[in-house]
Image (spheres, rainbow, N blue to C red):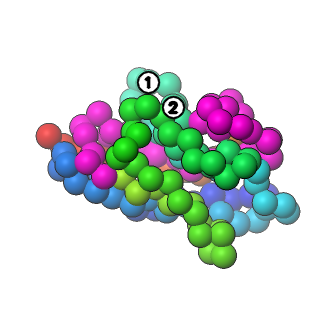
Amino acid sequence: GQVLVESGGGSVQAGGSLRLSCAASGYKKNPLSMGWFRQAPGKEREGVAAFDSMRNAVYADSVKGRFTISQDIAKNTLYLQMSSLKPEDTSMYYCAATDLRLKGAAAILKANYNYWGQGTQVSVSS
């Protein structure tokens, strides 16, 4: 089955940057959408950024202008460049993929994804 492995998390001060990576393998056909989600303790998992099935980048309002999603198809790797980090960005970040054809905001809805990585922790101190 499909395997997603995240890396790149860590601890940074507010205003700093991190780049997360997600290496994908094992799928029989390319997923139609891939994205990043996050979950803080005691909170629901929320969508951060994703490519919809038309390869349009979709972002949550809370990260627009600060985070950038990108993909290296040859390496089967998804990235999330995070800049101007804030303490409220502290969360476990998950990579996800889906066989569904998604458009726009649907691409950052967790219910639409069926493949998940184990997550990588991002901690931002003030």
Q: Is residue 74 above or below residue 6?
A: below
- The answer to whether any part of residue 118 appears in the image is yes
Where is residue 48? Give x, y as percent. 49, 39
Residue located farthest toward the right when viewing the structure as drawn: 28
- Identified at 71% across, 37% down, the residue is 103
Residue ranking furthest to the bottom: 74
Residue name at image x 39 percent, y 39 percent: 63
| Residue 10 in view (yes/no) | no
Which residue is more in the foreground, 10 or 74?
A: 74
In the rendered image, residue 55 lying in the magenta stretch gets the answer: no
Out of 5 and 86, give the one closest to the viewer.
Answer: 86
SS type, badge 2: strand
Q: Which residue is mark 2?
A: 46
Q: Is residue 51 above or below residue 18?
A: above
User: x and y percent of residue 12 in the render?
Assistant: 22, 53
Report the side of 71 relative to 7 (left or right): right
Q: Which residues are magenta?
A: 83-112
Determine contact: label 2, label 1, CB under 8 Å: yes
| Rendering quarter of residue 42 | top left
Residue in view at x 74 percent, y 39 percent: 102
| Mark 2: amino acid | Glu
Q: Are there few (<14), some (14-19), or many (20+) residues within 10 Å of tag 1?
A: few
Give residue 64's quadrant in the image. top left
Left or right: where 92 falls relative to 103: left
Q: Which residue is mark 1?
A: 43
State the residue at coordinates (32%, 40%): 90
Secondary structure under badge 1? loop
Question: x, y percentage for residue 94?
Answer: 52, 46
* Amino acid type, label 1: Lys
Q: How many marks?
A: 2
Q: Is residue 57 left or right of residue 25?
A: left
